[in-house]
Image (cartoon, rainbow, N blue to C red):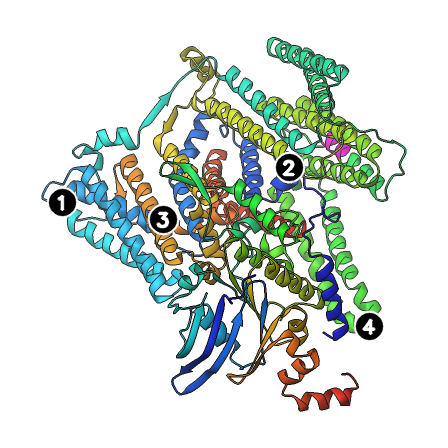
Amino acid sequence: MWPGEVGEFMSETAVDSAPVAKADERIVHRGPLQRWLVSPEIGALIGAVIVWSFFWGNARTFGEADSTLNWLDVAAPLGIMAVAIALLMIGGEFDLSAGVMTGATAILIGLMATYFGGEGIHIGWSIGAAFLAAGAVGWFNGFMVNRTGLPSFIVTLATFFVLRGVMLVMSKRLAGKVQVADILEQDGAKTLKGWIAHEWMFTEFKGRDFLFLALVLLGGAAFAYGLLEQSFIRRQGVSLVDLALSLAGLAAAAVGFTALNRTDGVGANVLWGLVMAAGAVLLAVSTSRARWKPRSTRLTDPVPRGVLVRVGVGLLGITLACLTPIPLDRSVDVPVLTWVSSGLRPIVAVVAAAVGVFLAVRASVPAIRARSLRGEVPRLLFFAPYCGLTLMVSVLSFFQLSTVQGLRAMAMLALAAGGVVLLMSARGLAGRSSTGWQAVIGLSTAVAILVLALVIRADAGAVRFRTGLFTAMCIGATLIAINTLLELSMEKRRNSDPKADRLGKRLQFAGFTLAATGMIIRVVWSNLTPENAEKVKAAGGTVGQNVLRQPVLWWALVAAIGAFVLTKTKWGNWIFAVGGNQDAARAIGVPVEKVKIGLFVVVSLCGCLAGTLIALRYGTVQANQGTGLEFEYIIAAVVGGCLMTGGYGSVIGACLGAAIMAMSTNGVQSTGWNSDGRFAFLGVVLLLAVLVNNYTRKKAQEAR
Amino acid sequence: MSSQPILELRGISKYFGNVTALEGISTTVEAGKVTCVLGDNGAGKSTFIKILSGVHQPSAGEFLMDGRPVNFISPREARSAGIATVFQDLAMAPLMSVWRNFFLGSEPTKGIGPVKWFDSAFAKRTAKEEMAKMGIDVRDVDQPVGTLSGGERQSVAIARAVYFGARVLILDEPTSALGVKQAGVVLKYTRMAAERGLGVIFITHNPNHAFPVGDRFLLLNRGRSLGDFAKDEISRVELSRLMAGGAELEAIEHELGIG
């Protein structure tokens, strides 16, 4: 730097010496949805929804109350550990002994209660001792990592082997075999199980569905209102016209809802459903106009480039999706290749091969242009046939493996989803320059989804598609219509308003709580009275038992405490800092060693909690129980948005990750596939979730 | 501004075994003034900072704070006496938000009984206000520190030190890794910190950065002081000349036609 520039510094210093804080015009205010979209758990949330919908569509029992409770029971020990491991990973360390810790503590409890002092000690004492031992192991892990500076990977791998060896030797010596059985037969075990691992049986509850609906609707409304509160500018005074309109909308929605619950005919249902949807749209839009500042818009802006193409292709996709049922019959359960008439099969093969060759040639066009054809010839000679052959084999094997049914489902899903995505993208693109076109495209998207829903309803074989999917799509269309109209008619807030933001946040939280309560009620109770159950059985359905097991509550408790500590306390701040920049944390006075030891102890204690629950749940523990699970915990945490390198992640995300894994296990079983298939499924889920996480994190750091 | 300096160093020396790291260094740091410590690589700047911030103890010489001799045996002790050091790596976690970094290690809490939580509303508001006092508008205190520019990150570190009651602020080469414009921003904040009544020690090897902000210049070369000047005792040209070994640089400048 040279003298002239230094002079500039001085003048700047002199002029700007009074602190000035002015709004930065380069920064666009991020609305509530954008904020929410960059949180670490978003990948896991999307993954959970996809996995749930996938199994809901494929397995008949998945999604029912009893099966939900089943997979929650599978998820509970995994979730407890995922929370602890997520905290540890955010703190920048791993614990490979976590899995074997659950088994080791379970075995220890069993051995002490069965064999110690001749005929075993009271199980309460055994559990207490197991917790002390686990805490000591955790402390040792942390101490060794701190003292030696070795990677925790190595230290805990050593602990893993030691624990495993000790447990095998001890159980062989004391029990004479590699398992401990009859734990529940011991003194006080049943009582303790009643306290720690209780099982509640739930049967019917008549008001269940009504309460579920009411709570979800109320919660959804509160949540949506909170979102609006965060998005718009308050207006002066109240517009009476809009208020009256919103009351009319409320009335229409209420009438539609009541009528919908009374009628059973298809035509009447559609009619009242439409009334309800229209009421909801009117209610939302006029309530917004009554409370927040409306805006006037011109509808004559030119259409941005690229929008019309997207709209066209999107509408074409949806139309094709609606037409898929005509050539493909849903009842045909034979491979596509068999179904295709024999004359057509070679044509399919040739077309596939030709496409492969074409793609290969096209890929090397730039190289040919840049250099010469001669250099590319050998490459093309090998590469093009290879591509053609590969594509042909893939297409033929796909057609051999998938049935006409399957192809039909996939084609419909892909066409419909692709069409909707294109339309939404066109809507976003149009919104940049023309609000009018945005509105037109948004509303046509809503109508297109509605038509698609009606087609599915008329055509689908399974009841849950005809009702469940239909309802979900109608709700989705209504929400898109509401959102579009709000975008058109309301002025968006460009800067933050702490008061309104806080109110919005509280409303969202309240709404979420209400909706979650509704879902819990829906999941816990069944609506089957004994007479109804007989009817269902007579019709060939299955009637499960709704058993809520206490481990699920322990999981919820551990997750709540973990999330609170991580995001709301100074310890959480320290955990982030220790994982994010250990030297910095130490330099600024964070007790790095204490934090790490604390995290390792927490992981071990959670392992012991999981072990206790396993011992009390089954009464029999294998000595290799838990071995290998440590990777599942790490996967759950990573799927939930934790960074492998530390310093970033979330507890809620880890819980969602655990839920995804448990759903996959349970879902693969209930679809009737080979249950080992879940590993393949999990691998794909892991990869996709991490990709989404990376993408959102990058977006998060660009967007600001 | 009191006439008595906050820090006074008299004949500070530091030996590591038979290596002389510093020999007979004297200077003063006054409230509201910027003392620049200049020196090329290996001049003893880092040893000097480490003595000031309590990492090392001087082997000989007097270290006075408010006129009383002190002997810090740990960085923690120096910090609680009000000597804050902003190291080059800034002691921040890049993936954490501005407000979390701002209060790292000294989190404000509130709570009921033993259950205490991080008062995040206060932390966010205060971080924003303190940054505004430095003349920086953080658009969003929720954004990760890693997304800020180098100059902004420096300013967060400076604002943090000022907020937590530092009386003496040691800036370790704050401009060395920055571009021209960013360096200017940091110089501005350095000046601003001094105007708020802190004694600032500004370490650099660039006389063109030191001269505009400094009130006093301590020049180090191979562990020895080349002199301790008030601003009116030395010109920019002379400062550059002393820094780079005098005549040699003059010759180069002459050759290149600058100067």
Query: Pointer 4: what residue?
Result: A371
**Numbered disc total:** 4
Q: Are marks 1 and 3 on the same chain?
A: yes
Query: What subunit carries mark 2?
Result: A
Query: What subunit carries mark 1?
Result: A
Q: Are marks 2 and 3 on the same chain?
A: yes
> Where residue B154 sits in the image (x, y, percent)?
60, 61
User: Marks 3/4: CA distance?
Assistant: 60 Å
Tag 1 or tag 4, which sits nearer the N-term? 1
Give the label, 2 or 4, closer to the camera. 2
Amino acid at the residue labelled 1:
Phe
> Where residue B199 sits in the image (x, y, percent)?
55, 64
Classify residue A71 by image quadrant. Answer: top left
Q: Give the residues drawn in magenta, as a range.
A: A318-327
Query: Pointer 2: what residue?
Result: A32
Query: Pointer 3: what residue?
Result: A603
As drawn, is A523 to the left or to the right of B206?
left
Classify residue A387 by image quadrant. Answer: bottom right
Identify the element where label 1 is drawn: loop
Check disc 4: other Cα within 10 Å, few if <14, some if 14-19, many if 20+. Answer: few
User: Marks 2/4: CA distance?
Assistant: 52 Å
User: Marks 1/3: CA distance?
Assistant: 27 Å
Q: Do the numbered discs 1 and 3 sit on residues whose CB atoms are within 8 Å?
A: no
> Where residue A186 sits in the image (x, y, percent)?
17, 35
Identify the element where label 4 is drawn: loop
Tag 4 or tag 3, which sits nearer the N-term? 4
Query: Pointer 1: what residue?
Result: A116
